[in-house]
Amino acid sequence: MEQLDNDRLVWMFTQMLRIREFEERVKRTFEEHPGVIRGHTHLADGAEASIVGSLATMKPGDQMMATYRCHGYPIALGTDTKTIMAEIYGRKDGLCGGYGGSMHLVDPGRGFLGTSGIVGQGIPQATGVAFAAQLRKQGQVVLSFFGDGASKQGAFHESLNLASLWKLPVVYVMENNNYNVSTRSEQEDANAANGEPLSVKATAYSMPGVTVDGGDPVAVYEAVGAAADRARAGDGPTLVESKVYRLSAHGNIIAPPGVPLHYPEHEAITTFGNREEYEAALRGDPVPRFRARLVEQGVLDPARADEIAKEVTDEMDGAVQFALDSPFPEPDAAARQDYVYA
Amino acid sequence: MAREIPYIAAVQEAIRVEMERDPTVVFYGQDVAPSDEDPLVQAFGRERVRVSPISETAEIGMAVGLALAGYRPVVELLMAEFMLVAMNQVVNEAPRLRYMSGGQVKVPAVFKAGYGFTAGWAGQHTGSIYGMFMGFPGLKIALPATPADAKGLMAAAIRDDNPVCYLINYLMVLEHGDVPEGEYVVPFGEAAVRREGSDVTIVATGWTVGRALEAAETLAKEGINAEVIDPRTLNPLDTATILSSVEKTGRLVIADQGTRHGGASAVIAAEVAEHGFGSLKAPIAQVTALDVTVPYSEPMEAYVLPNEEKIALSVRQVLGEAPVAA
């Protein structure tokens, strides 16, 4: 794994800020432009450090797959945020032409092979991508992102068994935000209920399991990087449990057409009445935390940090405006048979 | 050069030929080549021919991933019902990813399984469950009814850029027939006219193709000239060939080993009712399995299945030459 130099650290901070600002804009869209976003969106705010620390390990040719909570990955991989926002707004210029929406972003040219909207179902697919990488013998590594809830799916267990058995070059990155929508991990996970980290699940499949502070991008980079090195060397998969705190609710409210959508408060508050848990998470917010650390270490000048923030704000202003200005697809584009069948 | 080989050997031959011509084809599944002496392992090595655990979700999900990454996996699933364990991957992932991506990705994967093993396998290993797959745009379905088609449709399935459920009828695996050597591809969406006739069209799938041909021979002795059409693939479905046959004969009997409600037969009947109504001189008749779970005991199993006699009776009925039961 390569050492993170100052430029790379600032790049990481910038990507974290871009993801945060993008997600804030998605959230604000519900108030500023009611009706523009339909269905269900899931935000990555709180997981920026984990996403960026993980993706920073990728080398050219490496690939990744994720879940319906997928806005952050393509932002860090370099997909134009204009097209991501336009996709979320259902527009013709969207990344997927309006066919996929918030939950189904994909940018294969940048190594992002897709998501599943169904919990855990992207894990075997990422494992298959790693099978392909093993056959191709070009040293590629695949990152498979999923949440803590997915680790109760058979898809997770079947995949880890196979990947370990066949020594596939894959790193399983479990973003553990401690909530399955509104159910807490200790209510549905035997390891969590017994005070164990979820990374112990790796033991059953004879692979390393590590738990890392997902709010620290450097710690995530080192953990995922070590796992990627191991995978690249042909030694097989690793389970990395990255502990994050989701700073928004699971998603916007679920409601039939005509009811204005919005983001409710976090489930710690709405379901469990535990405002202090949420406030503590806000105090530990990874984005300002990383900024303060880089400034303190002399890596990042505060004035430069403000400039970056301004650039990011401008970028996301542009993304929102682009998406608003983009036309809707022609309705009959829905019948394109070349998209149904290759 | 064609020579006679069994249906099951024709399937294996297609996989072998396609693996020889395309290094991106991989073959794995439960009980696939556990021994290193297996001819496919000998020919292509352990990298491309693997035995996998009983993990359908991972096996099929990995095929989706392999396909997204540029390979052409063939997954051995043994029994069509085993796909039900991983239904999300088969119907909600593989066929939807291309569309949802706005055409950015493709998923060329073959899900190979047997079906219709109505030979005392009771309720959970005998189903002809392909009808449900017809409700998922993007998912192709091949039902070879001859050894030659078993080879040619498998080759087409592997070369296809979309997910394909390639379904072997387990009652037919030892049936012999002429199969071309070397590369041989039967294109999807082209029905085969197995027997030409002018009085009635029998559309039959898989194992019922043979039953329909037997019925047609019996009927010929009665002066009834039946045309037998085998769609070969249910998606794409060659409705044009079926409609033009019905236009000629004016009558349609559909024979299918699956159940009726929501099944392949119902879809074909609806296509003809909607687009060929003007040609019909009699109501469409469907000869399907009864809408029950396949029972174990032999007389009951035989009772629920379509057969030569039931097909012949339906033909006589649509021709007005036998009473229709109330």
Image: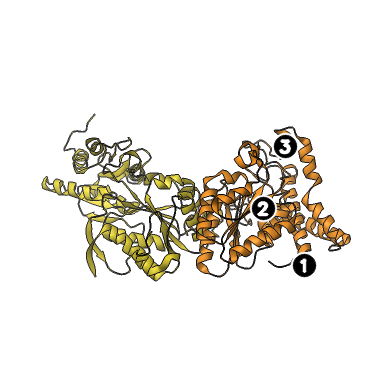
Q: Which residue is mark 3?
A: A268
Q: Residues within 10 Å of mark 3 (few under 14, many from 20)?
A: some
Looking at marks 3 and 1 on the same chain, the residue that comes earlier in the sequence is marked by 1
Q: Which mark is residue A71?
A: 2
Colour in which the image shows chain B: yellow
Percent across and percent down for residue A60 are: 63, 68
Q: Are marks 3 and 1 in contact (CB under 8 Å)?
A: no
Element type where label 1 sits in the image:
loop
Q: Which chain is orange?
A: A
Distance from disc 1 to disc 2, alpha carbons, whole Å, reads: 26 Å
Dot in front, 1 or 2: 1
Name the kind of residue labelled 3 in the image: Ala
**Subunit bearing disc 3:** A
Residue at 29 percent across and 36 percent down: it is B295
Q: Nearer the viewer, residue B17 or B101?
A: B17
Percent across and percent down for residue B299 are: 22, 36
Assign the N terminus of chain A to one quadrant of the image: bottom right
Name the kind of residue labelled 1 in the image: Asp
Q: Which residue is mark 1?
A: A5
Distance from disc 3 to disc 1, alpha carbons, whole Å, reads: 37 Å
Dot in front, 3 or 1: 1
- Above or below A243: residue A8: below
Q: Residue furthest left?
A: B221
Dot in front, 3 or 2: 3
Quarter-of-image position of residue A180: top right
Element type where label 2 sits in the image:
loop
Element type where label 3 sits in the image:
helix
Residue at 29 percent across and 39 percent down: it is B289
Residue at 42 percent across and 69 percent down: it is B22
Q: Residue furthest right?
A: A303
